[in-house]
Amino acid sequence: MASNQDVVGDDKGGNLSNLSKWQIALLLGVGVGVGAAYYLYRRSQPSKSSSQSAEVKPIVTDESANDETNITNMSAKDRASAVKAKGNKYFKGGKYELAIQCYTEAIELCPTAENEIRSVLYQNRAAAYEQLKQFANVVEDCNKALELNRLYTKAISRRSRAFEELNEYRKCLEDLTAQCILESFQNAATIMSADRVLKIVGKTEAKKKFAEREFFLPSKAFIQTYLESFANDGLQLASISDAPATIDTSAFEEDDYFLMARYNLAQCNYGDIIDNCTKEINKDFSPYRAEAYALRGTLKLLMTDGDSAIEDFDKVLEFDDASPRVKVNAIIKRASYKLQQEQTNEAIADFAYALELDPENCDVYYHRGQAYFLMERLSDAILDFQKSYELNDNFSQAYVHLGYARYKSALTQQSPSLVEKSIKTFEDALEKFPKSADAASLYAQILQDQQQLQRADELFDKAISIHPHFPSYYVHKGVLQVQLRQDVEAGIKLIEKAIQLDEKCDFAYETLATVEVQRGNVDKGIEMFEKALSLARSETDLSHTLSLLIAAQTQIKVGKNLGVSPMMPFQ
């Protein structure tokens, strides 16, 4: 499909779609099931804090105020309490302006030394302002309440809601993070709210960063995986594994730019391909002009220069004499980019157009299956993967991802029998395609998910033995060492091995960052997150990695503000 990493079989070695990144957190002890994007740490049950004991519950009480009571002889503290009770009565009756007047009077009456009582009064007045949707006033009063009692979770919670209403999502996230820390990450509702806001922050900031990104070619491993997801590319491109060791280039004419570009692709020499294709396109006459546009568009897509890539793919379709297979290849890649841009209907329409041109092309069904998978249309994905394999029974990727689509569907249906059926598909895949590292790795990840850890470890070893220079297999095996043997050092060594093999493997940097933050090496973790950000291949990936970085930074900042360490259970 596209060069993005949202497809099931991406540069991470056929990982479990988008689940792999979040799954890393789960394997390291993170609450992925609730708020997967956010929680890097587990917490123990909290102890009672002074804010909890001082807190008036409910926030606005149900006690009746005796309007006839003579309060002139009361102490200032008691007079403030009596006026507060009157305000509570007004609040319960929906008379929020009158409640605000009472709370204001109570604040003026209450001695300045009574910090806990005054914090509750400010918080109660903030509650009335919230009902009137005066969110700036809510923030101001919660600030005052927290100046008097910084651990007052009710005030933190109310301010977080106000910040969200004011679209101040970073501040909202900080307050939700403070809640989580004070609740020792035991409140599922707070965790889910923090996760939701974190994703908003990540997506918003990622859009800006992605627009400012520099275009660069991804790693050889990424390009290899992408090319091998096409069985009928139409450009006569040899796969990396099948590339001949030597080709007699002496037969090339000086201006055989496209032939040289295609040769360089087979040899994994990607740097001059776009330039050679451009020279071929600019020739007065070329029998390869359509192919040159298609190949140049492919490299631009891999560089995340999607708009320029689309221009090249559109050019391919203008050639009446271009091979239908070349046109279909361009349409599939155009569809994948549209899917990245969330233009779902247009993407599906492109797949339909491709099938009109070549109804027996297994690539169309495979990549449309990937699209359906991402759209969670699992039944349609299964049908397309099955059709792709029927059209080309040597296309291992189609069969492997058929197995995973069946597995995901079985989980959705909560059907153990269907899970077993999907696992049987992978056992068959290992027999049918014994040299497929992708089959071994993806099967290992499913077994890991099923807690069959020893067998998963063996399969990762198999994948590495088949493809020893592919970095993501080492990352997956490294994570498994933490889960299987609690051997963090061994896991880190494997992840670092992946980086040695491929310095552009963002998956390795991101995973290493998560491990380092998990074990308290925060500065190192942030450094690795930032490296992963610089290598993100799509706005979606950038948003995800940025969210993890922001989560770590926010927990550290808030922990310091609260006087606790987010790395340790809150006491």
Image (cartoon, grey):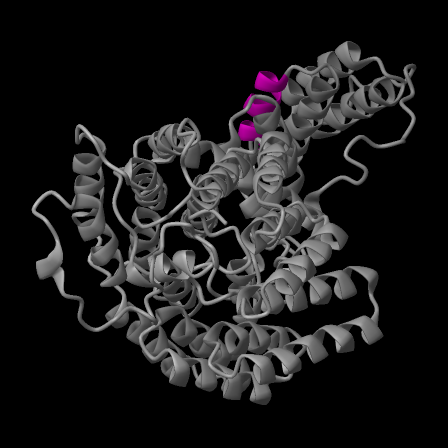
Residue 530 x, y percent position in the rendering: 31, 50
Kindly indicate the quadrant of the structure image that contains residue 215.
top left
Q: Is residue 142 magenta?
A: yes
The correct choice, above or below, for 472 with respect to 195 in the image is: below
- Viewer-closest of 304 and 562: 304
Query: Can residue 41 be seen in this snapshot?
Result: no
Query: Can residue 153 be seen in this snapshot?
Result: yes
Residue 404 x, y percent position in the rendering: 65, 66
Q: Is residue 514 magenta?
A: no
385 vs 228, left or right, is right
341 vs 275, left or right, is right
Which residues are drawn in magenta? 135-145
- Viewer-closest of 477 and 216: 216
Residue at image location 48% in from the left, 41% down from the top: 324
481 vs 52, left or right, is left
- Viewer-closest of 184 and 26: 26
Residue 557 x, y percent position in the rendering: 41, 47
Tell how many labels.
Answer: 0
Q: Quadrant of the C terminus?
A: bottom right
- Viewer-closest of 111 and 390: 390
What main secondary structure does the magenta stretch of the protein show? Answer: helix
Kindly indicate the quadrant of the structure image that contains residue 133.
top right
The correct choice, above or below, for 280 with respect to 402 in the image is: above
